[in-house]
Amino acid sequence: MSSPDKKTSALLVIDVQNGNTSEAWQRDAVIGTIRTLIDRAKAADVPVIWVQHEAGPFKPGSDAWQIVEAVRPPEGETVIGKQYLDAFVETPLRKALDERGVGHVVICGAATDACIRATTARAQIEGYDTTLVSDGHTSDEGPWPLPLPDGREVPIGGEQMVAYTNFFVADTEYPGITTEVVPAAEVAF
């Protein structure tokens, strides 16, 4: 397998589904941002790949499984179903990226604390230059109790998850790749 061209980008729209965005932090703003990113990518002839979770409450065909109408792909677009948080696990995502010569992924979607975090980390490990759109991902508004090893719980909400994930990804380095966390207005495809 040849090395991907580091100059070719793709937009990954991860799990923007009814079941995980209905109570999301800044839902409408984030979905609007993602819609704008999709339109910009398509205008620049940049491939857009949708990822759709198909496990747990996201049963194919159910309302929870449906991609949010505002960002739903038209017929014939690339949609990759997945069973795990990491969109690379047992899916054709790597193949789809490699077939397009992609070396840079721009990541947006839901949910920050799960599929965004896992897929962003894996993209970096797989050797893709990675851009996380700082205002293009979200998670449940919360707060929800996050258990600590000592039995205590810390209330965490979507705003904290987005802030922490943006910080963590921006601070993560791997040899030979670039990583950035920028607002949608600064995304370069």
Image (cartoon, rainbow, N blue to C red):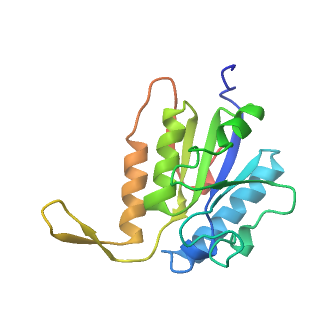
Q: Nearer the viewer, residue 153 or 169?
A: 153
Number of numbered labels in the structure image: 0
Q: Nearer the viewer, residue 46 or 22?
A: 22
Q: Nearer the viewer, residue 104 or 91?
A: 91
- Please name the residue shown 65% across and 37% down the image: 94
Q: Where is residue 40 in the image (x, y as percent from the top left)?
A: 75, 54
In the rendered image, the quadrant that contains the N terminus is top right
Q: Residue 83's quadrant in the figure?
A: bottom right
Q: Where is residue 161 in the image (x, y as percent from the top left)?
A: 39, 63
Q: Where is residue 21 in the image (x, y as percent from the top left)?
A: 56, 74
- Please name the residue shown 71% across and 32% down the image: 98
Above-or-below relation of 171 to 113: above
In the rendered image, the quadrant that contains the C terminus is top right
**Left or right of 118: which side holds 155?**
left
Q: Where is residue 12 in the image (x, y as percent from the top left)?
A: 65, 51
Q: Residue 30's quadrant in the figure?
A: bottom right
Q: Is residue 110 visible?
A: yes
- Please name the residue shown 63% across and 36% down the image: 104
Q: Can residue 189 be seen in this view?
A: no
User: Which residue is most to the left?
Assistant: 150
User: Which residue is most to the top?
Assistant: 2
Above-or-below relation of 91 to 8: below
User: Which residue is most to the right?
Assistant: 76
